[in-house]
Structure formats: structure tokens, C-alpha cells
Image (cartoon, coloured by chain):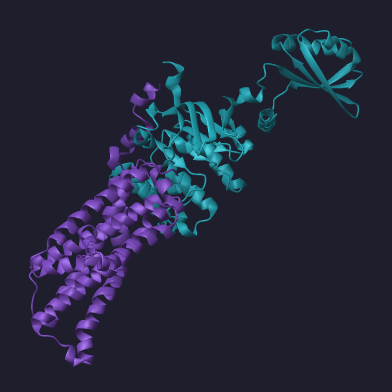
Chain colours: A purple, B cyan
């Protein structure tokens, strides 16, 4: 075999040495990760990108909260609650909105991530560079998880925190509130990893969107008839998050649900990695 | 150093099947270092499949292959670090500009310094004539501009091996000329392995050619060898004026003359004389024709094929 070519410094190194460029020698399953990750994060936070993303989520979550917490009492003064009840209600509204709109948003954003790259041919182009397939999938997951955490959860939470304070005059304890956001994130990452996995399994957007949305809506509906589903799937994330924020004791089902959601997220991610390794372009 | 040390690509029994249907059969290919290797074949012959296997974009179902001595399955990343690739239908992120696309590509190979990466990007934009379109988004690019961008991104890492899949297929004659000129210029720096079905391009720039048909390698040789005929016999073309019967009789008496095919146009007779002994033919053929002084030789020469003839002959033989 070609041992001569293998051991001789290649043109890249020679040219790089001449020009002063420093070659990257990432290898293995994270090859190309840094560059991919920078690009994927740019989809959320790049110039002119973070603003529309932020505005959309502020309008959906905090805008609706503003309407319910500030406008409705003006229209209907009888709806004004005592401070403690108002605190619980306002918190529940915020966590409920994120757990519903956040999941829908995450599914809509993630359903296109893999399919678009496969259909447009950009995945084939990127993977013709020194990029590992694992890095390709992991950067999609990680960047979307960070984007979700910062904009859908973090930004709206900061504004919601202020709104709750304004309407109740009470500041929520910060750490329990932050922990409740972590609970929300477990639910969102579950649907993010599920949707990314579906993107590696299918070639069209329809099944990806349909199955992910089906799992969400189906689990919510079935949990009314079969509450035990809550031991496995993240169907009570809003209730668990509210209990955490208010420092109430959690039922066993809550722990089981969160651990199960985290484990399932890992399984979805592993499945996506294994499936994408066999993808042909 | 044995000959395989000079091969950049080497495949052994490489094959690919989809659901039992073979699209690539038992491919044994050797691409010499610093060659411009034309990978020729009609549409659907398996050219792109071979290229994608070499780049790890699809998996072979049989055989094995090495690029720079690295196994294509186990060491694909090491291979891709030294390769520049232009796809048949190159696709990039539509929202990125040409400059951003090249910067993104360069950062898969170089960690810095930033100003030198920018300089390399600028150099590629200049080289491919995209400098004035550098900050336009790719979405608005024409087919030719995309192809230029494809060539730029394929070269950004000073590749040891440039793999081009139908690089000139979507270009106008001027664009084709430019692409071939770039390939010719890069010859001394890199090995170029490119697929095409444009025979004229292959004949202009390639030094070695492989012909693939229905997923099978039907010929692989230096282009001059292929164009001189590959069946062990030499053919001479002779144009005569006058009565050729004496000369014909002289030639048919020679044991090294295999056949003479004749066509006549106006007063001229054209012969294609197939010989089995080139040395004898070089020494005696012309003398024997002129010996009887019954004909004038208007032209005489060794027949060379053009690639189209070679290609069509091979493909016809395959069909029959």
C-alpha cells in the first residue's frame, strides 16, 4: 500500500507552513466539532438573528403573560387574586406557556434541522470535509439546546420574573426558580432529541413533524386516562416545575418522569448518532 | 519504492449494491500521484458512486480502497483532510455569502490565524473570479457561479488530491475553458481525479483515463496508449493517387500486414493498413507502396484515435 504518501508531509502541511496557517488535527468522533458548533450557534445568535428569535418568543410567552396578568384585571377587576395566589397563578402561567409553546417551538425548529441538510445536499458537502458524523449530529443538538435555554427559557424567564414581581410585589426565590427552568429544559431536550432522531430516520418532514407532535399530544391526552404514563414521559413538566419553584415536595412520579425523560433523551441521541453513521449521501 | 507507492488512490474489488442491484462491480483502480486522471463514463455508469465511496459519503458493499494509503472506511477523516471535493451539483448554505462559505470551509482545515484565513479566502475568490460577488448570498448565484465557488472551496486547503465530479458539465464554453485551465495549472501541485462525460475535456487535459460503463471498469490506461489503439495492432492511414492494385498486391504478400480496408473519394484511395509488426511497418510499408511507381502517396501516417472513437468502440463492445 501507499506507505510513502502516508508518511510524507502532505501539501497541506507544506503550504500551511509556508503561509503560516495552523492546521487543525481534530480527529475521531468530534472531528470538525468546533467549526460546526460555531456555525450552528450563529443560526441562533448571529448578527440580525438573535433579535427576531428573541422578539418572537417574548411576544408569544411574555406578551401573552402581560395580557393575562395586566390587561385582563383591567377589563375584569373581579379576576384580581390575593398576592400569594397571584404568585402561584402567574408562575403557573409562565411555566405552562413555556412547557406548551416551548415544546411546539422546539419540534418546529428541530424537524427541519436534519431533513433540510439531507434534502438540500449541504450535509453531503459538509461531510466531504474532515467532519465526523457524530459531530454533525451533536452540534445540532447542543446548539439548539443552548438556543432554547438562552432565548426560549432564559430570556423569557428573566422578563417573566420581572412581570411576576410587578403583579404580585413578591420576588420569587432565585435558585428554586432557576431549578424549575432546569425541569422545563429536561422536557424540551426530550422533544428536541426525539425530533432530531426522527430527522435521521426519515427523509421527509411530514413523518418527523407528525410523530414528534403525535408523541407530545398523544402523551398529554393518554395521561388523563393512564396517569402511569407520567412515570416515563414528560407529561407533567409544568406541574413539576411549579412545585420546584415553590419548593413544594415532589411526588415519586416526578423524579421518575425526569430521570426517564433524561434517559430517553440519551437513547434518542444515541439512536440518531448510530443511524446517521449509516446514512448515505 | 514500488509502483503502488506512487498511487494516490488504489481500489481493490470495490463494489456497491443497492438492495441487491449492483451499481459498481469489482472496481480495481490505480490513480498515480500528480496525474490528471479522467474518470469517464456515460450517465449512471457509477462515477459519482465511486467518488462518494472514496470520500466516505456512502459505504462500499464489496472490496476495499485506500487514499494516500489510508483506508477509506477506518481513516476517512484523515483522507478528507487532504482532499478537495467538488460535487456534481454543488450545494451550499443559501443564506451564506461566497466569502462566508469559503471561510466556513477553511475553518474545517485551519484554526488560524484569522487574518491568514481571510487572505486565503480572498485568494480563492480572486482565483475563481468571484471577488466582485464575494459578499452576495449564494442563493442568488447562477450555476456557473456556484461551480466557481465549488472550485474555490475545493482548493481552500491546498489539497493533495482534488476530486471533481463533472466539474465542467454545467458551464458554458468559456467557463469550461477556465476550469480546464485551473486544472492544468494545478497539475504540478496536486493529483486531480475527475469524472466527466465530456470526451473533449478528457482528451485536452488528462494524462490517464479510466472508462466505466454499467458500473464496470472497461479500460484504464495513459491517454496516449488509449488513443493509439489497445488491441495490439497498429493501423496506418495512407492516401494514394493512381492505380493502387500493384501496391495492394505487394502489401498483402507481407506476413505482418493483417488487413487493408479501402475507401475511395474522387481520384483518391484511402487505405487503413493494419499491421502486426510496427518496426517492419515503419521500415518497409512506405517503400513497398511506392516500389511499383504506379501511385503517388498524398499522405501517410500512423492512425490515432480520438477519445470519442475509443469510448464508443469500448461501449459498443460491452453491449455486444
| Among the 4 quarters of the image, the one containing residue A40 | bottom left
Q: Is residue A268 above or below residue B4?
A: below
Q: Is residue B113 above or below residue B237?
A: below
Residue A160 horizontal side relative to residue B203, left or right: left
Task: Identify the residue at horizontal 43%, vertical 53% (top origin).
Answer: B98
| Image quarter (top left, top right, bottom left or bottom right) of the N terminus of chain B | top left
Q: How many marks?
A: 0
Rendered location of residue A167, percent (x, y): 14, 82
Residue A68 horizontal side relative to residue B286, left or right: left
Rendered location of residue A169, percent (x, y): 9, 81
Viewer-nearest residue: A96 or B264: A96
Rendered location of residue A3, percent (x, y): 37, 22
Q: Is residue A77 above or below residue A63?
A: below
Rendered location of residue A33, percent (x, y): 29, 46
Viewer-nearest residue: B203 or A137: A137
Q: Is residue B128 above or below residue A175?
A: above
Can you see residue A253? yes
Residue B44 horizontal side relative to residue B51, left or right: right
Q: Residue furthest front?
A: A225
Viewer-nearest residue: B144 or B11: B11
| Among the 4 quarters of the image, the one containing residue A22 | top left
Can you see residue A38? no
| Image quarter (top left, top right, bottom left or bottom right) of the C terminus of chain B | top right
Amino acid at each position: 500500500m501507499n506507505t510513502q504518501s502516508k508518511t510524507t508531509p502532505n501539501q497541506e502541511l507544506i503550504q500551511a507552513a509556508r503561509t503560516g496557517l495552523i492546521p487543525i488535527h481534530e480527529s475521531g468522533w468530534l472531528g470538525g466539532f468546533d467549526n460546526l458548533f460555531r456555525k450552528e450557534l450563529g443560526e441562533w445568535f448571529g448578527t440580525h438573528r438573535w433579535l427576531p428569535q428573541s422578539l418572537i418568543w417574548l411576544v408569544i410567552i411574555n406578551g401573552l403573560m402581560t395580557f393575562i396578568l395586566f390587561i385582563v384585571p383591567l377589563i375584569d377587576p373581579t379576576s384580581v387574586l390575593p398576592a400569594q395566589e397571584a404568585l402561584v397563578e402567574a408562575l403557573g402561567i409562565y411555566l405552562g406557556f413555556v412547557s406548551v409553546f416551548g415544546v411546539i417551538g422546539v419540534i418546529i425548529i428541530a424537524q427541519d434541522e436534519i431533513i433540510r441538510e439531507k434534502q438540500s445536499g449541504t450535509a453531503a458537502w459538509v461531510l466531504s470535509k474532515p467532519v465526523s458524523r457524530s459531530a454533525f449530529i451533536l452540534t445540532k443538538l447542543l446548539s439548539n439546546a443552548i438556543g432554547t435555554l438562552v432565548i426560549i427559557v432564559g430570556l423569557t424567564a428573566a422578563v417573566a420574573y420581572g412581570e411576576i414581581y410587578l403583579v404580585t410585589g413578591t420576588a420569587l426565590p432565585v435558585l428554586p426558580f432557576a431549578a424549575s427552568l432546569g425541569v422545563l429544559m429536561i422536557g424540551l431536550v426530550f422533544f428536541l432529541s426525539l425530533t432530531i432522531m426522527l430527522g435521521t430516520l426519515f427523509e421527509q418532514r411530514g413523518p418527523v413533524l407528525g410523530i414528534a407532535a403525535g408523541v407530545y399530544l398523544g402523551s398529554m391526552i393518554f395521561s388523563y386516562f393512564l396517569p402511569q404514563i407520567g412515570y416515563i414521559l414528560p407529561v407533567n413538566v409544568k406541574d413539576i416545575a411549579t412545585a420546584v419553584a415553590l419548593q413544594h415536595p415532589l411526588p415519586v412520579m416526578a423524579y421518575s418522569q425526569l430521570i426517564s425523560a433524561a434517559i430517553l433523551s440519551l437513547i434518542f441521541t444515541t439512536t440518531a448518532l448510530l443511524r446517521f453513521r449509516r446514512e448515505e449521501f | 519504492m514500488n509502483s503502488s507507492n506512487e498511487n494516490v488512490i488504489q481500489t481493490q474489488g470495490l463494489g456497491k449494491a443497492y438492495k441487491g442491484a449492483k451499481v459498481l462491480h469489482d472496481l480495481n483502480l490505480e490513480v498515480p500521484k500528480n496525474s490528471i486522471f479522467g474518470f469517464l463514463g456515460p450517465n449512471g455508469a457509477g462515477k459519482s458512486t465511486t467518488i462518494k465511496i472514496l470520500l466516505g459519503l456512502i459505504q462500499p458493499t464489496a472490496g476495499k480502497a485506500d487514499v494516500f494509503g489510508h483506508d477509506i472506511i477506518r481513516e476517512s477523516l484523515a483522507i478528507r483532510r487532504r482532499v478537495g471535493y467538488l460535487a456534481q451539483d454543488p450545494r451550499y448554505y443559501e443564506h451564506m455569502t461566497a466569502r462566508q462559505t469559503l471561510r466556513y470551509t477553511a475553518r474545517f482545515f485551519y484554526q488560524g490565524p484569522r487574518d491568514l484565513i481571510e487572505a486565503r479566502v480572498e485568494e480563492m475568490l480572486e482565483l475563481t473570479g468571484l471577488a466582485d460577488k464575494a459578499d452576495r448570498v449564494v442563493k442568488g448565484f447562477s450555476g456557473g457561479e456556484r461551480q466557481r465557488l465549488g472550485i474555490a472551496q475545493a482548493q481552500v486547503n491546498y489539497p493533495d488530491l482534488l476530486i471533481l465530479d463533472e466539474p465542467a458539465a454545467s458551464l458554458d464554453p468559456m467557463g469550461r475553458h477556465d476550469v480546464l485551465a485551473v486544472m492544468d495549472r494545478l497539475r504540478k501541485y496536486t493529483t486531480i481525479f475527475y469524472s466527466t462525460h465530456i470526451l473533449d475535456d478528457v482528451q485536452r487535459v488528462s494524462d490517464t483515463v479510466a472508462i466505466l460503463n454499467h458500473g464496470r471498469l472497461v479500460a484504464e490506461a495513459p491517454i496516449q496508449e488509449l488513443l493509439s489503439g489497445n488491441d495490439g495492432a497498429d493501423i496506418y492511414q495512407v492516401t494514394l493517387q493512381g492505380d493502387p492494385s500493384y501496391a495492394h498486391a505487394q502489401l498483402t504478400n507481407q506476413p505482418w500486414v493483417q488487413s487493408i480496408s479501402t475507401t475511395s473519394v474522387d481520384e483518391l484511395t484511402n487505405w487503413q493498413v493494419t499491421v502486426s509488426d510496427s518496426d517492419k511497418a515503419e521500415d518497409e510499408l512506405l517503400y513497398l507502396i511506392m516500389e511499383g511507381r504506379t501511385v503517388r502517396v498524398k499522405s501517410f501516417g500512423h492512425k490515432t484515435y480520438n477519445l470519442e472513437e475509443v469510448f464508443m468502440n469500448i461501449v459498443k463492445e460491452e453491449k455486444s
